[in-house]
Structure formats: C-alpha cells, structure tokens
Image (cartoon, rainbow, N blue to C red):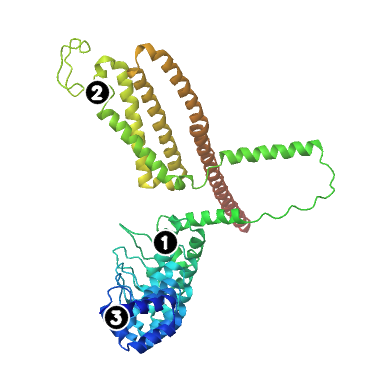
Amino acid sequence: MEIIRHGEDEVYEAACSGCVESLNALIEKDPHILIKLALTTETETPLHISALLGHLEFTKTLLTRIPKLAKALNSFRRTPLHLASAGGHKEIVQALLSAYPEACLCRDEKGRIPLHYAAMRGEVEVLKELTRANHDSVYLTVDNGLKETVLHLCVKHNQLECLKFLVQLVRDEGEFLNSKAGSDAGMTILQLAWMRGQIQTVRYLLSFVVIRAEATAVNGMSSIMSDVLEINNENDRVPPPPPPAAAEPSPNRSAKKKKGAKGWKKKLTKCFKYPKQWLEDSRAMLMVVATVISTMTFQAVISPPGGVWQENNTNSSYCHENECIAGTAVLGYANPDYFLLFIKFNTISFLASVSVTLLLVSGYAFHNRIGKWLLSMAMCVTLTFMALAYLRVLYLVVPEANRDSVISISHACFYLWIVLLVIFSSVMNTIRFLIWMVKKLRTAYVRSKSCLQKIIRSRSFSRNASIDSEENAAAGV
C-alpha cells in the first residue's frame, strides 16, 4: 500500500511540473497506476492539476491514456474544464472539450459552469471555444438563487471585452439582454453597470435598441444616462489648441463696455435659468431628508422636551387650580405660551415634510415647473419651521442663568440663515417660477392675439365681399 501511495505522489509531482517523461516512466512501472488513482482520489486528479497549470502535453497524454478523467470532479465539484477555463488555457480547453463536450454544462458547488469562470477572468478566446462547443451554455444562469447570467458576471467583474463578445452572440434576444438578477426585484446588466459607475459599459449597452428601449420605459432612466454620458464625453474631449495671436486693432472703450454688459447679462440670465434635472438627480437625497425631518418632528410630539406627567397630579405648582393629567407634557403647564409655539412650529414642519414626501412619491413634481416650485417651497417651509421649533425648545430647556447669551447667539445665527434661505432658495426659485410663468403667458397672449387678428381679417374680408356683391347686384338692376 505504501508503494502505491508513493507512486501516486510521483504522478502528482509530474503533473505539477508537466513532465511527460516522468509520467510515461511511472506508467511503464505500473500500467494501471492512473486507473487506481482515478478510483481512489477524493480531491483533484492529475488532470485537474495539469489543466489548472496549463501543461498542454501532459494533459493530452492523460486524456489519451484515460479519457474518463475529463469527467472527474474535485472536492468543489469542478471538472478540469472549469480550471482550464478560469486559467485561460485555450488549447487545453479544446482538448478537454474533445474528450468530454458535456463538461461545458457541468455546474460546480456554486452553481457555475466553465463559461462563467472564463467570463469572470476576462478570457475571450476561451469563451469562443466554449460557445462554439455549446451555444446554449450562454443562457444558463448561475444556480445560486440570484439568477445571474453570464452577462451579469461580466459586468460585476468589469470584463467589457467578454461582455461585448457575448452580447454580439445574443444581440437579438431582448428578453435575455434585459433579464434581471439579484436579490428582491433584481437589476438588468445596464442598471448594474450604471450602479457600479462603468461609463464605457453603459455607453456600449445603450447602443443597442432593445436595451435602450427597456431603460427608457423605466422612469426615463435612459435619458438620464445619456445626459451623464454626454457630460462625460465633454469632459474627456481634449480642448483644441488656441489659435495663433493675430495683430488686431485694440478695441475701443465703448466696445469693451458693450462686451462687459453682455457678459453680465449672460451671467444674470444663467443665474435665474431653471437648472435641468436637478430634481431627478437629487430625488433620493430629498426623500431621505424629508423622511428624517418627519421622524424627528413626530418623535418630538411623542416624547416632548421635559417629559410627560406619569400620573394625575394636583400638588405641583405648575398645575395651579387645574389637575395635571397623566400623559400630557410637563412644559405645557410650566411655560404654556412657548410650548404652544413649539407645537405649532413643529406641526407645520411635520406637515411640510410629509408634503415633500408625497410630492416625490407621486412623481407630479418631475413633470412641470409648478411641481418643482411647490416642492422647493415646501422644503423651505420645512427647514424654516424646524429651526423655529428648535429655538422654542432651546428657550424652554436652557436654565435662566445662561438663557440670555444662548438665545442671543441662536437668534443671530437664525436670522443669518433666514437671509441666506431667502436669497438663495425661496426668492431664487420664486423668480425663476415667475419668469417661466411670464414667458408662458406672453406666448399664450401672442397666440391669442394672432388668432383674434385672423378672425377679424376673415370677418372683414367676408363683409367686403358681401358689400361688393350687393353693389354688383344694384348695378345690374
């Protein structure tokens, strides 16, 4: 038994080095050594090792002696073809497919076939051999519950060349190209590439009509991608060299003033121009902010500052002649005026934040300027009254000894913030909205005026025609 074990070790050593002469010598000593080894091994066979390390002649010798080794599975249920495909050994893949073509459909313990490993490693030549042997292997998904296709694996491992080769094979299969994989609802290969920031991959996938049409049908995703790609293309362009300086007469002072006036006018117009797709790009952020503010304002009512009475109380100095009811706010009795202001400000902030969430969920704000203006105003109201509620609570909880200094500092910061909010948010958005409304009304007025003029002209023409006919009739009489 020790002699057999020693012979097996020598076969594995020959497989690691790829020495065919050593293998032939061992077979001459024991013609049945490979058969014994194939029956007794529990892990890799020598063919697994030679296929992984890329020893072509050694692999061919083993396959000539015992072709059934191409069917052997290691401890991870992988065939030699799995290892050769992952290693990118094209000639060995050809030899293994000749011996056992069905190996290209065998799954390992992770549910992957050799094609998947070749795509993950970026081995395009191996992919050509595997798809030539069995074209249907392209459509096999990873058997791990996520339903990942080989295209998803190419995107996950950023193998663009492999993706291009495979997409060309199935370019007419729109359902397969737009199939979703992953947990929950899953993602298409275009969404996955977009999420991973693979701009070149996204640009390539959008060149196919079936992929672009599917992306356009999902919340206009294709247009957003196209805009980002266009911006990326502009950033990638190399600016042309400046033209050689020509001897030109220096402009006079009036020309400089005119040019400067045009420049300021252009900057001012750009400042008040409504930004494109700012809402679509900030939708997720606005949703998170609105949700957080709603939670904060709701929690402030459930757990008000100062706590609540744990039981009915009539002995406290806060209660005066009335009974302090259990579950009501303590500060509502201690300082009712400021506490009432806090409740009003907090409630307005809560309702405004809920309105922001409603506008975002409904999608109404994404289609017209009115919705965008309402959304920006609701967000400004939310932030303003949240700040006011904070100041009221600050006055309620700060001790009287430190109240004056803290309140004065908070008031100064709040007024500064109000000025910034009015200048850069409320007023700016309102001016943009009014400019848009004026343009719309002017266009409608011009159209109605032109229509009215046409009506007047047609009526005057018909009236003149009737007068002429009457005169002609009278002359005839």
User: On the picture, is 106 further left or further right than 205?
Assistant: left
Residue at the disc numbered 3: 3
Of mark 1 and mark 3, the one earlier in the sequence is: 3
Q: Position of residue 6 (x, y in %)?
A: 32, 78
Secondary structure of the residue carrying tag 3 is helix
Q: Position of residue 347 (x, y in %)?
A: 32, 29
Q: Position of residue 271 (x, y in %)?
A: 58, 39
Q: Alpha-carbon neighbours of circle 2 within 10 Å: few (<14), some, or many (≥20)?
A: some
Residue at the disc numbered 2: 307
Label 2 to label 3, Cα distance in Å?
84 Å
Camera-near label (1 vs 3) is 3
Residue at the disc numbered 1: 156
Secondary structure of the residue carrying tag 1 is helix
Image quadrant in which the C terminus is located: bottom right
Q: Is residue 98 visible?
A: no
**Which amino acid, by three-letter code, is at mark 2?**
Gly
Image quadrant in which the N terminus is located: bottom left
**Which amino acid, by three-letter code, is at mark 3?**
Ile
Camera-near label (2 vs 1) is 1
- Name the residue rendered at 36%, 89% in the picture: 28
Q: On screen, 312 above or below 91? A: above
Q: Nearer the viewer, residue 372 or 135?
A: 135
Q: Nearer the viewer, residue 428 or 125?
A: 125
- Name the residue rendered at 46%, 47% in the picture: 281
Label 2 to label 1, Cα distance in Å?
52 Å
Label 1 to label 3, Cα distance in Å?
48 Å
